[in-house]
Amino acid sequence: MKRLIETGLMFGNLLPVDSPALVERYNRALKSLAGRTTGLSDFHIDISGYSPEIGDELGDDLYLNPNGCNRQFILLSTAQKTAPLLNAKFSTSRPILRRFIEENEDALFALTARDGVAGELANSVFDLSSPARLFDIREIVVEADTTGNMVAQAERLTGLIERFRTVEDAWWDDALIGEMIELAGETGNIASNPVHLQPLRVAHRDFWTSHFGGLYVFRSLEHPAAICVTPDRIPGKLPIARQFALNDRNRVARFLQRNDLVEPIVRARHVDAAAILGQKMDFILVARASELGLDPGGSSRRDLRKLARVLGDRLPAEFQALAALRRWVTSQGDWPRITSEHPAYFYTLRARPGPHRDLVNQLLSELSPLDVRQLFICHKQLFYELYRSWPEQKKQYVVSFLLREYQVDKAGTREALFGGEEPMENPSERQPDPTASGRAIDIVGPWGAVLRAHDETRKSRRGGHGRPYAGPWSGRGEPR
């Protein structure tokens, strides 16, 4: 992991805390939240104020997240909004924190100039003794104030000022005036510099959690479901209509399609499908070569083509299928047939634009782990976990690639792979793509007419897994 840290691919973009004043503010906030302090004179913090150095010092990586379900945070600067969130237990935590900072940026800038801001992503659940408790979390409320309670004091002062203005004979209330003067000495002039944090309440319906071996929960969809990464860690049935394992590829594929959550890369708008498929093939090629103890050599196209020739029939099925699809994209081959049971199936998809895009792309990265770029972007915790077991040759190649191809333009790479933000559309109002040359893919979904026969085939499933799912690949020479 040292290589990742030195190159900024791990613990990158953390905020340094390296002055006595900042350390003092941090310790006051930490004392108010956890009853602890640090003896370190400098360290780094993420968007929530968590520091890996302090975690090591205290021997507790969850010192700001007890029980893993009510994340506490410390803000010393609004610059924390661009930092990552380490040791995330829920996929929703970082977006909520960033939104809170952005919606209160002016007030937080003024507050953190004088003191640290301590707070919590609060919900009604205080323990996760069973997986079912996850479904009791319906809403996240962001609660925050300075360690000196400046926000609360300012709100109290605002109330006193209103009382002074509206209550008859308040001019003669010496106690009221004295309290106002005392509070104003602590808060400053709240008329010219308002000290108020906009409340933030966020519905918590669709999320990933690392608890219980990993769980994806989609509750807001027309066909809700929970997808268990490690099903043997989930005792009993969850309080949701559908529950199945991540390795039940047919059911995962049907779930994604029925809710219109994914699209084939080759049909996505404004993407270079051939380039994306080619890069995925490179990742798979390097992984296979490293498994066999072969040196991937350089990263040039010539080196990789040479490596592919050396491997020959030892090339994995994922590589062969993506190569066939790429040949079709470049008009050099026939349309391949790839069902949900094929190991390349989920490598051919990306999430549709919309509110579930990031969560679905994270799910797809777990289903296509050899695509190390998507894995790094969408699911860093899994990337770091898998990185530890990779052969040295693969580690070198991946680090070199990410530094060369991703770090230099993160936003551009993400947009090229996953698309920019687009306005939501009603699936029932989606019109056929006029560029599709008569293909019905946008009318019946990326899986052609398979869904129409879904109800007829449900009862014929073997062992609850169903038949192999054709997905966007109909096997008739054209995408349907």
Image (tube, rainbow, N blue to C red):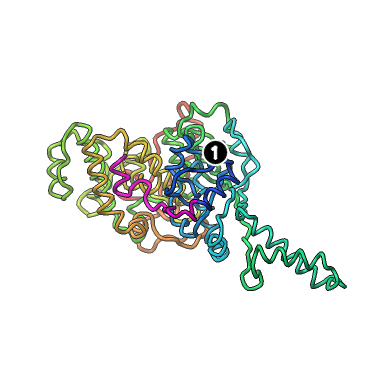
Q: Closer to the camera, 277 or 385?
A: 385
Q: How many marks?
A: 1
Whether 12 is among the magenta residues is yes
Q: Position of residue 192 (x, y in %)?
A: 63, 73
Whether 133 is among the magenta residues is no
Q: Quadrant of the N terminus?
A: top left
How many residues crowd mark 1 within 10 Å: few (<14), some (14–19), many (20+)? many
Direction right: furthest residue: 169
- Indicate the secondary structure of the residue bearing disc 1: helix
Residue 437 visible (yes or no) = no
Residue at image position (35%, 63%) is: 435
Relative vertical location of residue 421 with respect to residue 300 in this rendering, above or below: below
Q: Position of residue 341 (x, y in %)?
A: 36, 35
* 73 left or right, relative to 124: left
Q: Position of residue 353 (x, y in %)?
A: 45, 56
Residue 424 visible (yes or no) = yes
Amino acid at dot 1: Gly
Label 1: which residue? 68
* 468 left or right, relative to 232: left
Residue at image position (40%, 38%) is: 469
* 434 left or right, relative to 114: left
Q: Closer to the camera, 137 or 440?
A: 137
Q: Closer to the camera, 9 or 376?
A: 9
Q: Position of residue 42 (x, y in %)?
A: 42, 49
Residue interval drawn in magenta: 1-23
